[in-house]
Image: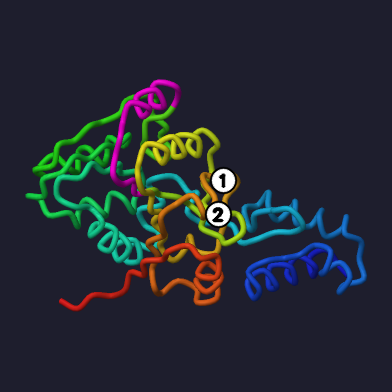
Amino acid sequence: MLAAVRRDLLLERLQRDGRIVAKEIAVELDLSEDSIRRDLRELATEGLLTRVYGGAIPASPAVADYGARTEIASESKDRVAAAAAELVLPGSTVILDGGTTTLSVVRHLPRGLDCTIVTHSPTIAVALLEHAAEVILLGGRLFKHSAVASGSAAVEAAGRINADLFLLGVTGIHPTTGLTTGDSDEAAMKRVLASRAAETYALGSVEKVGTASAHQVLPLDQVAGLVLDAEADAAALGQLRDTGVRIIEAAHRSH
């Protein structure tokens, strides 16, 4: 079988099943596992899938830079953000992660809401200028890809925070690989922030559900729940429900 034909078949199977098991497809095609693994490595290099132990799963398109992400699934992010904003209670201390979905959360928060918001995102902080909430901005080296502070200074500052809630942004949410993002330092910062909150909820618009990126932030059993778009892939949503994690489904709202 020609390499181009195998490539198309692998991508078609990934789209259909949401996962490729190298051993199974090697038997099906009467090829060596090494041949399948080589194909998967090449496809992963092109960003078309994410390799995992034994095979591959869909790659998240949300690893694009900050500017590009503002154009991806904007309506879905808005629905998720509206549902997530309802988790923010008066008098609470909330950590808002950086990212386009959490920026949308700010737009759904009542401007008069009395709470404290901690963030390492200067974009989030600026969006809160006209809100009644007290804002604590964590500093550090600016990671321009996601427009957030990172590095040792940001980690040290985060270690002094105690919060009721962390609204976590990720690029992939998958029943096997859990919550993932595209940068190892960013993943580490997100873990630190999660450790400072009583509850962590990960936010997932349609393009993130059922996909994965290179670096795990947390397994699903270490968060209080997920806020996901009800219009995400039904099979992927079902697999996430099967893990037992709490899911808040965000749907269209009537005006």
Please, is residue 139 above or below residue 3 in the view?
above
Coloring basis for residues:
rainbow
At 48% from the left edge and 60% from the top edge, which residue is drawn?
A: 208
Q: Which residue is mark 2?
A: 178
| 215 sits to left or right of 10 | left
Please, is residue 73 above or below residue 131 in the view?
below
Quarter of the figure that contains the N terminus:
bottom right
- Kindly check if marks 2 and 1 are in contact, taking CB atoms under 8 A apart as contact: yes
Label disc, if present, on residue 79 of the rendered structure? none
| 139 sits to left or right of 131 | right
Distance between the alpha carbons at the discs numbered 2 and 1: 7 Å
Quarter of the figure that contains the C terminus:
bottom left
Q: Which residue is mark 1?
A: 216
Which element is circle 1 on?
A: strand
Please, is residue 4 above or below residue 198 in the view?
below
In this view, the residue in front, 93 or 168, is 93
Residue 204, given in percent of the width and then of the height, sits at 42, 59
Residue 73, given in percent of the width and then of the height, sits at 39, 63
Q: Quadrant of residue 26?
A: bottom right
Q: Which residues are magenta?
A: 151-167
Total count of labels: 2
Which element is circle 2 on?
A: strand
| 1 sits to left or right of 170 | right
Q: Is 172 colored magenta in this rendering?
A: no
Please, is residue 178 above or below residue 6 in the view?
above
In this view, the residue in front, 127 or 92, is 92
Q: Is 164 colored magenta in this rendering?
A: yes
Q: Crowdedness of circle 1 by 10 Å Cα count: few (<14), some, many (20+)?
A: many
Amino acid type at circle 2 is: Gly
Q: Earlier in the sequence, mark 2 or mark 1?
A: 2
Residue 20, given in percent of the width and then of the height, sits at 72, 65
